[in-house]
Amino acid sequence: MSKKVSKIGVLTSGGDSPGMNAAIRAVVRTALYNKMEVFGIMHGYTGMVEDDIIKMDGRSVANIIQRGGTILKTSRCMEFMQPEGRKKAYENLQKRGINGLVIIGGDGSFRGAQTFSNEFDIPCIGLPGTIDKDIAGTDYTIGFDTAVNTALDAIDKIRDTAAAHDRVFFIEVMGRDAGFIAVESGIGGGAEFVLVPETKSDIDLIVKSLKNLRKSKSSSIIVVAEGDELGSAETIMKLVKDQIQDPSKDFKVTTLGHIQRGGKPTARDRVLASRCGMAAVEGLLAGKTNCMAGVMNGQVVYTPFEDCIGKPKPLIPDHLKLIHLLSI
Ligand code: F6P
């Protein structure tokens, strides 16, 4: 039986997401409220392996709730994947008496935490920090709402110029292997088509619809998730263009890229991050480990890492129907 957690380390790992700072703030302040000591581990697991660990107090997290990025920095650490790297990491925690960890990141980060806590008996709780929303055990992930709103703002702007020039725009959004950002920004942005990895993309349907474009609409927006099975927005645009064979049609591609990862977190992301941050510390105090604190149906829930890692999260079928139905 491990002893009560009294000194915790907090780190951000994998791709940054807006709201990570709000989560760090909540972890630090909840821990201090509960008379625990808190350490910030820099650059994700790299800081654990390389002993880049700083003591944190209430002021270390002042004035960060509104900032994108992560004050603790982040990385994807190869050394931590090796047993020797994890042993070094453990020794660095031991030096300071750190006996609990909060990991803010995606499912790859949770995989590392699970292996580590099984090997060294350090309780670990994860928080879902990724713009992709691709983690089971939580309805939303920290950063998703901000990323969708960033994409939406870009789509609105592109729509202005698309309409002005009667153009067809293919807009590529992030999401790795998941189509959540594409679907929600596509619905919000009134896209004619949204192509996602979860469903087979139908080029013939797009071609047919665009051939009739002049008769019905003057411009079109097609949102492409970066993980779509047909390839990038550029590739898909070329496939469509080759089939349409109409020099009067003007096709453009915009790849939104890392702009989706930055910026001020929305209220929704700040609240989610704050709730999950508090829940992580309370979970550690209650003896929980190897699980993620998320929010489902408005309630904080703890889901074992094994049920979060590598579990595909389905798109909401109604969302796909909406796009099709509203694009006439
Ligand atoms: O997982 C977040 C994410 O932004 C994905 O949407 C994207 O595929 C990937 O990270 C990009 O990674 P990197 O920042 O290493 O280019």
Image (cartoon, rainbow, N blue to C red):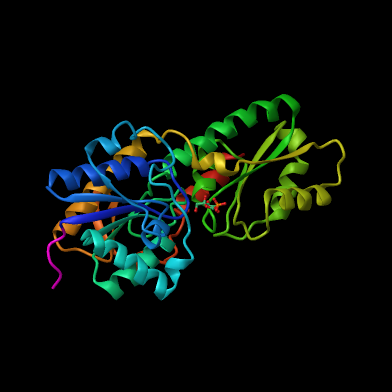
Q: Nearer the viewer, residue 140 or 213?
A: 140
Residue sitting nearer the eye, 171 or 88:
88
Number of dots carrying numbers: 0
Residue 25: image x %, image y %? 28, 41
User: What residue appears at the point 12 percent right and 62 percent down from the top-left corner?
Assistant: 4
Q: Nearer the viewer, residue 7 or 154?
A: 7
Residue 231 at what x, y percent from top left? 68, 57
Confirm whether residue 136 shows in the render: yes
Residue 183 shown left or right of residue 293 in the figure: right
- Is residue 277 part of the magenta span, yes or no? no
> In the rendering, at what x and y percent does residue 78 appear?
49, 65
**In the rendered view, would you say 86 is above or below 136?**
below
Image height check: is 200 above or below 36? below
Q: Which residue is found at the position 56% from the left and 43% from the top?
A: 258
The reply, left or right, for residue 102 in relation to residue 244 is: left
On screen, residue 250 above or below 200: above
Q: What residue lies at 61% left-to-right and 41% top-to-bottom?
A: 256
* Prevalent SS, magenta region: loop
Q: Is residue 50 left or right of residue 214?
A: left
- Quadrant occupied by the N terminus: bottom left
Magenta-highlighted residues: 1-5
Q: Is residue 298 visible?
A: no
Name the side, left or right, on which 193 lies relative to 262.
right
- Up-down relation of residue 110 to residue 318 (above or below): below
Specify the quadrant that holds the C terminus.
top right
Q: Position of residue 18 (x, y in %)?
A: 42, 41
